[in-house]
Image (cartoon, rainbow, N blue to C red):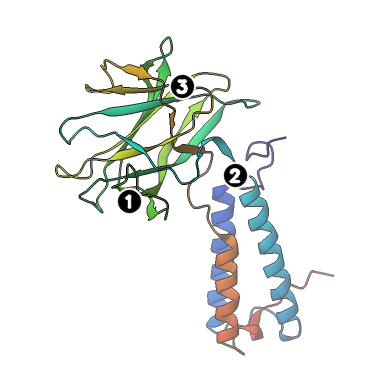
Amino acid sequence: MILTCSTYPFLGCPDLRRHTLAVLWQAAILSLNGIRIFQRRHSIRRLALLFVAGLGFAHVSSASAATIYSQTMPADPHAAFASHSAFDPPQILADNFSFDSPGSVTVRSLRVVGGTGLVESLIDDFRVVFLSDAGGMPGAPLTGGDFSIGPAFSRSPTGGPLLNGVTTPIEYAINLPSGMSLQPNTSYWLSVSNDPSPLSGWGWARANGVIDQSTASTNGSIEAGSWNTFANGGMWFELNDHNIPEPSTRAILTSLIALCFASRPRCFSGLDLTLAR
């Protein structure tokens, strides 16, 4: 059974979590300012209870996040194909995928591995496009499925072998602002390209295909093509139903308690969650 906001609103819902954290933060600030809201005798015990409850809330929230589709083997890829439009000659890649699910899902983030070639660039300009399938080739971009991302949310070297023997492999975490709703058991294509600078192309790491070994490329535009397919394996990517990173309730609660301990006794003089009798 999949837990979602619609079936269990108290699990993993961003608005509720943000509201809860805001309330906790305001309580800590009031306590630090010496306002005696609660009684001294219960302060440490009740604060510990609050902390434990927060850990459980964070655990349930993170447990509700899921990976929709993963094509990430080998874990440390060693080869890449160019996927960029600004560098000459241009080439855009796309890879097909499908997934099983009880119902529609919304892709909110993805992970990809790639590199910027001999001239490494720290400036990224990603474009992520979801396309329909047209007889085993990329079709038209899906409505609402063309994302001009710009820089990735995060980028970090994988520590794996150089891509094609020359390029430092980078893992990119990319959030999709509005998300992309997809249907199960349906063939789609994903195109990821990056134009870091006119002097630097970008290569998308290769992976073992999951549903097949087909990949497509075009030297034209994503919208117009034309596309060519080849059976040289798949591309390295993972699709997720949550933004990266998930809001860390655990980290915030830990910081609040550490702050309280650092400011004793003023903090603990004011906290009591005694239930009404």
Q: Amino acid at mark 2?
A: Ala
Q: Which of the 4 image quarters holds residue 258?
A: bottom right
Amino acid type, callout 3: Tyr
Which image quarter holds the N terminus?
top right
Residue drawn at 36 percent across, 49 percent down? 169
Reading the image, the residue beneath label 2 is 65
Q: Work out whether 124 lies above or below 219.
A: below
**Which label sits on residue 188?**
3
Which of the image's four quarters has the C terminus?
bottom right
Q: Residue at x 67, y 63 (%)?
A: 55
Residue at 71% from the left image edge and 85% from the top image edge: 40
Q: Provide the residue designation for mark 1.
A: 168
Image quadrant in which you'd find residue 131? top left
Callout 3 secondary element:
strand
Closer mark to the observer between disc 1 and disc 3: 1
**Label 1 close to label 3 by CB (< 8 Å):** no
x, y (%) of residue 264?
60, 89
N-terminal-most mark, 1 or 3? 1
- Of labels 3 and 2, earlier in sequence is 2
Q: Amino acid at mark 1?
A: Thr
